[in-house]
Image (cartoon, rainbow, N blue to C red):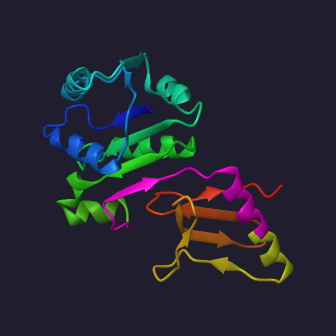
């Protein structure tokens, strides 16, 4: 599996990365690194890869790295979020928009609940997000068509909303279907994904 680790450049407690990797259950076969992101975290990742005898593939920039990572299906991102470096959240949003599976570890900012609330209302600190596949998109299109046929509006995005769980383990906690659009939000995600109806 091709792996990219998104974390602050100068993370003081690298144990957070080790914990995130362990809890994600990812078995990496190759580590992706962007050479435009240097710092103590980068040095630690190189040392970690050497100990794991893990090959490293370097890219001159993060956008080029993500473009390469989104090709194929055997890839993942492990992201460690810090209140002092919120730019990692922007990187997570980019990863999600490319439908790359991402594991988000929020232990760092869970220490301060005020920051935690500012970033995301999601209480679960560690979630594994899977991208929508063709079968799931087809399911939501058909569900939208049924709702339109019977004049039903479906919205589970409230706090009391139900949870849709697919057989592959993918879970959706936000489903918003109306006359014009079909939007779904994977469990723990920061954003909705709009599904084209045509």
The C terminus is located in which quarter? bottom right
Q: Residue at x 51, y 30 (%)?
A: 69
Quadrant of residue 194 in the image?
Answer: bottom right
The x, y position of residue 169, in whole percent, is 51, 61
Q: Is residue 138 magenta?
A: yes
Q: Residue at x 61, y 53 (%)?
A: 132
Q: Nearer the viewer, residue 107 or 190?
A: 107
Question: In the rendered view, does 171 fall on the left or right side of 19?
Answer: right
Q: Nearer the viewer, residue 10 or 107?
A: 107
Quadrant of residue 153 in the image?
Answer: bottom right
Question: In the rendered view, does 102 fall on the left or right side of 197?
Answer: left
The N terminus is located in which quarter? top left
The x, y position of residue 121, in whole percent, is 38, 67
| Highlighted range, magenta | 121-142
Question: In the rendered view, does 19 fall on the left or right side of 158?
Answer: left
Q: Residue at x 23, y 65 (%)?
A: 114
Q: Residue at x 71, y 65 (%)?
A: 140
Q: Residue furthest left?
A: 12
Q: Is residue 82 magenta?
A: no
How many numbered circles does the render carry? Answer: 0
The x, y position of residue 176, in whole percent, is 64, 71
Question: In the rendered view, does 38 fall on the left or right side of 1?
Answer: left
The x, y position of residue 42, in whole percent, is 25, 25
Whether 71 is drawn above or below 23: the answer is above
């Amino acid at each position: 599996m091709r792996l990219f680790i998104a974390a602050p450049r100068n993370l003081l407690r690298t144990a957070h990365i080790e914990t995130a990797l362990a809890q994600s259950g990812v078995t990496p076969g190759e580590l992706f690194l962007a050479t435009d992101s240097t710092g103590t975290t980068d040095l630690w990742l190189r040392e970690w890869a050497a100990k794991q005898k893990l090959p490293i593939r370097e890219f001159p920039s993060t956008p080029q790295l993500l473009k390469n990572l989104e090709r194929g299906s055997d890839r993942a991102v492990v992201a460690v979020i810090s209140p002092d470096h919120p730019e990692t959240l922007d990187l997570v949003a980019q990863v999600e928009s490319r439908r790359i599976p991402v594991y988000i570890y929020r232990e760092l900012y869970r220490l301060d609940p005020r920051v935690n609330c500012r970033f995301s209302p999601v209480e679960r600190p560690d979630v594994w997000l899977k991208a929508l596949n063709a079968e799931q998109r087809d399911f939501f299109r058909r569900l939208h068509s049924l709702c339109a046929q019977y004049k039903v509006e479906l919205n589970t995005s409230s706090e009391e909303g139900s949870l849709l769980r697919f057989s592959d383990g993918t879970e959706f906690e936000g489903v918003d279907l109306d006359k014009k659009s079909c939007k779904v939000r994977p469990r723990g995600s920061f954003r909705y994904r709009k599904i084209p109806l045509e």
